[in-house]
Amino acid sequence: MIRLFNTYFALRTIILGVSEAILVSLAFIVAMVANLGLLNASIVLTYERGFVKLSPIVCAFLLCMYYFDLYDSMVLSNGREAFIRTIQVMGTLCLIFAVVYYVFPSLHLGVPVFLTGTIILAVSLAGGRKLFQFVNKLDHFSESCLILGDGPLANAVKRELANRPEFGMRAISQMGQEQLRDVFGSRSSLVLGELEGVTQKKPIRRIIIAMDERRGKLPVEDLLRLKSAGVAIQDGLHTYESLTGKIALESLHPSWLLFSRGFQVSRLLLLYKRLLSVTLSLLGLLLASPFMALIALAIWCDSPGPIIFRQKRVGLNGEIFTLYKFRSMIDGVDKDGTYHPASVNDVRVTRVGRWLRAKRLDEVPQLYNIMRGDMYFVGPRPFVPNQEEEYVRAIPFYSQRWSVRPGATGWAQVNRSYCATLEDNAEKLAYDLFYIKNISIGLDLLILFKTLKILLLGRGGR
């Protein structure tokens, strides 16, 4: 795996994306040669900005592949789903460039070249994806791992490794507490060859330590000896974080939060987040004001009550502030002061409100909160006080969310759907802690990019 934007990506997935970008270029170059001949194709590419004309196709292709989740773990392992979505990508590309070539005719490659290139690309993609799935499942190209531990963390790591073969790690064996004591305790000097004998003679390249209790039970000298022999030794919490983009709450200890790398926000980063928030919120309010007026008129005509919905939320250091949204529910549904999460097809939602919530347009007035400094654009999502108090009592480390200013969007919002239950919010905290631990400019930009995808596809709203 590789670390980019303070989060982790599967190296194989990145290689797949790069190789498919190259494949797009080659497909249209071959189409030029097939339609124009080698000499004329060389002239077009060299003297008529042929490579410049190819660049929009490559960029649009990669964006479409990303927006259709073709680099997602679930789709990567499902050949049928990947094939269907690839066909959708090709159709979308044709529609996009029908518009692009009409608006910018100078970019046109010519109808024969474009159609030929599209056909070659579709066939090449189908074959390339089949090859990737075949290679991705081969044990020979995966790093063999031994998991030490049999608790919740160890089982979670083993499950994630099985579900994400693109990370190139395969758990071939797992040692529980009793087996670990028997194996390591019976040898005074365990070496690599002996360990392979214990693990069915498979070559071990990485040991993941995912024990719930390590004090006095971890064979440190043996592990150091194995590390000297070339075996990578990795912490289970770090492995789980790298694979999932969230923190393993069930196995989290205060000492890990205290001594772990991260959980520090520099003054320079705070200054950047404030300047970015003020600039974008002012620009957003200016550009959105005509559209906001139309939304206000639609709400006023649709149902009685105020246009703007005001609600108390918990912000930085547990301080209360007023959040502003377009009203999307019947007026007075929360007069008892208790927050009730929206359910699917919630009868409290108005006709206009249902559309606003689906498109996330009810959130637009939060630009004013961002401009005031109540929130940033990116950060943990703020919730109402009674809900926060309940979760603080029920979920360990929940109050850590208040250590940074909340945001209109966040790492939890782009990685999971709407939160309604206690379990949902526990998982949301796992993502929020990952963000707080790894907060950076790059991670913020990645979240904004993913948020744009959610907004365009209308996902996750209720």
Image (tube, rainbow, N blue to C red):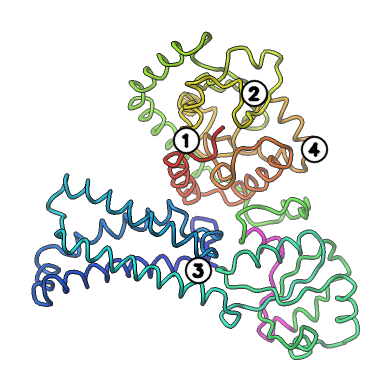
Residue that numbered label 2 is attached to? 320
Image depth: mark 1 or mark 2 in front: 2
- In this picture, which residue range is highlighted in magenta? 226-241
Residue that numbered label 1 is attached to? 274
Q: Position of residue 97 (x, y in %)?
A: 24, 51
Q: The residue under label 4 is which amino acid type?
A: Ala
Name the one closer to the observer, 417 or 230. 417
| Image position of 332 (left or right of 287) | right
Q: Quadrant of residue 34?
A: bottom left
Gap in Å between the C-alphas at discs 1 and 2?
A: 19 Å
Estimate how packed mark 3 is, as few (under 14), some (14 to 19) or many (20 or more) residues with alpha carbons within 10 Å: some
Gap in Å between the C-alphas at discs 3 and 1?
A: 33 Å
Q: Earlier in the sequence, mark 1 or mark 4?
A: 1
For the residues labelled 4 and 2, say whether their Cβ atoms are less than 8 Å apart.
no
Residue drawn where x is 72% and y is 60% of the image = 156
Q: Position of residue 281 (x, y in %)?
A: 41, 30
